[in-house]
Image: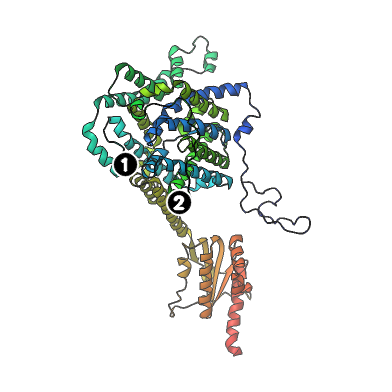
Amino acid sequence: MPDSVPGHAPSGTPAPPPAGGRLRLRQPFPLAAFHPRLLDSLRDYNRALFFKDLAAGLTVGVVALPLAMAFAIASGMPPQAGLFTAIIAGFLIAALGGSPVQIGGPAGAFIVIVYGIVARYGVANLLIATILAGGLLFAMGLFRLGTLIRFIPVAIVIGFTNGIAVLIMVSQIADFLGLQTGKLPGNFLSQMRVLGRALPTVSWPTVALAVSSLVVVAGWSRLALLAGKRWRPVSTVAANPANPPNAHGRLGRALAMVPGTVIALVLATAANGLLHLPVETIGTRFGGIPQGLPPFALPQLSWQLVQQLVAPTLTIALLGAIESLLCARVADSLIDDRHDPNQELMAQGIANIVTPFFGGLPATGTIARTVTNVRSGGRTPVAGMIHAATLLLIVLVAAPLASAIPLATLAAILLYVAWNMGEWHMFGLTHLKRYSNNYRIILLGTFVLTVVFDLTVAVQVGLVLACLFFIYRMAALTQIEAIAPAALPPAADGRPLPAGEVAAYHMTGALFFGAVNKVEALIDPRDRTQPVPAVLILDVGKLVALDTTGLDTLDALRKTLARRGGTLVICAAPAQVMSLMRRAGFLEQMGTANYCDTLAAACARAGVLLAERAERPAAG
């Protein structure tokens, strides 16, 4: 965020009055400028960049084809909903986003969320919730809230990501085994109960096709890696022309260009068409895919309906923001760049507002397709736009062929995606032993809550636990240590301060609502027999923060001392602590003479107070 906005002084300095002598109030929430990354990329665009983007866009478009259909089917929607989302949202996110290489579309993380919303509220309400979430995402970007997503602890992100991966795997068991379950319920425990009852209906031809597809998907990348190990860079060939790259090296590069998901989809569809396997396909369940984009349709919207969809809206917006910005950060590390998180959220918002009018799903940034785009040479948003155009061309030309795609193959693809989506090594004992119990509780708790309940509950509980543990750690860092009487500077007359009448303490850390008990322990107002020093000195020079609860506790300490004839003296307050004490009127109530800049000055003030106290009985 910039330090200043036009017409305002830099942060931390007062704005000078404009002509006429009237002060202008500083804008409390400066809005983010709408500036897509595409505009910057086109300034120096050339033919070389276009051909790189073209190759990357075509590659990502082919990769996105099976994933888009699989994500839609797993979400309880027809396959074309995923394709329309990848086309429309993918184009808008690329054209309007804040990252040069991010690819948008339907994401695996949304499968469980969308399925639950459809099961509970229906498809029409899913579209409305997506539109509302899009508006919320745009507002988050407009008000510069993109950086706040980074405040979510990594343990929560890993926990719900792994939990979603497990739920995706569970949702694909029925299609992978060919079980006759009907429509699965929305929660995990009910799904497991239904799947267990349906196990006798397993279809072995479906299992054989699904396992074969999974082997192809998982083994294709390994095959390409093994075939490409013997390929050597061009620079090596130039250094030794007598030893050019062999056929295995060229084969490895060719295999790596085609994703295993596409190979599995083509082989399974061809096998089903030739052998007429007794397996369920897109055609038998959905009647195929329409050859063209759907018409624009307005969903019915009412205030009563909006009130019921608050929870789904927040869930879609939160997950979309987290996924898109995490994906953009991964892309930054791959291309040594930095995305604009606020512009990215605004683009995600627009895409999620527009796509539901064409029957689409919630959309966000997708890590797998973004990484494919980068590795294929994509460097500008044009690659993402070409990826959307490639999918549109496939739908217009080859939609009738999709009817023969077996659902078992799509289930195998999703199982592979879900497995790669989870960070399973984070659950290993070796990894968990490296971290504190707080980290383990948040990680495992978020994971279990995501699987058993839902993402919203998991994130809410995870954030509450993270806040509580943070408060505990901050409170533990706050220390109040007594200063030995011999270590105190002398009074103004050079004599040492009497140990029984002066007590002094160093305060370090943060004096906030979680640590005020340490100040309260200095003097118990209920214990009248406890000896109270005539002067109590608090050296707050190492106090990094003070909140209103902490200040109220200091004021209670001052009043307790005053009732028993003692005086509170504070010294060496940092800027934030001093500012709050001054603004709250605490300095005036304590007496400005009882605040000192240094510990030595505070001890000198204590000597004066003791002298005044000694003179009072004589004067009486």
- Label 2, on which residue? 304
Q: Farthest top residue?
A: 242
State which quadrant residue 586 falls in: bottom right
Report the amino acid beneath label 2: Gln
Of residues 438 and 84, the one nearer the viewer is 84
Is residue 606 something one can see in this rendering? yes
Crowdedness near tag 2: few (<14), some (14–19) or many (≥20) residues, C-alpha within 10 Å: few
Q: Nearer the viewer, residue 7 or 561?
A: 7
| Location of residue 218 (image quadrant) | top left
- Say what amino acid the circle numbered 1 marks: Pro
* Disc with the residue nearer the chain's start (1 vs 2): 1
Residue that label 1 marks: 185
Scheme by which the image is coloured: rainbow
Q: Is residue 244 above or below residue 338?
A: above
Q: Residue at x 47, y 23 (%)?
A: 394
| Viewer-closest of 292 and 246 | 292
The image quadrant of residue 567 is bottom right
Number of labelled discs?
2
Do residues under tags 1 and 2 come within 8 Å of each other at their CB atoms?
no
* Circle 1 residues within 10 Å: few <14, some 14–19, many ≥20: some
Residue 125, x across and y down, in percent: 43, 43
Tell me if 210 is positioned left or right of 39 in this view.
Answer: left
Residue 107: % across, % down:
44, 35
- In this view, the residue farthest toward the left is 200
Q: Answer with left or right where residue 337 lies relative to residue 304.
A: right
State the separation of the CA atoms marked 1 and 2: 26 Å
Q: Secondary structure at mark 1?
A: loop
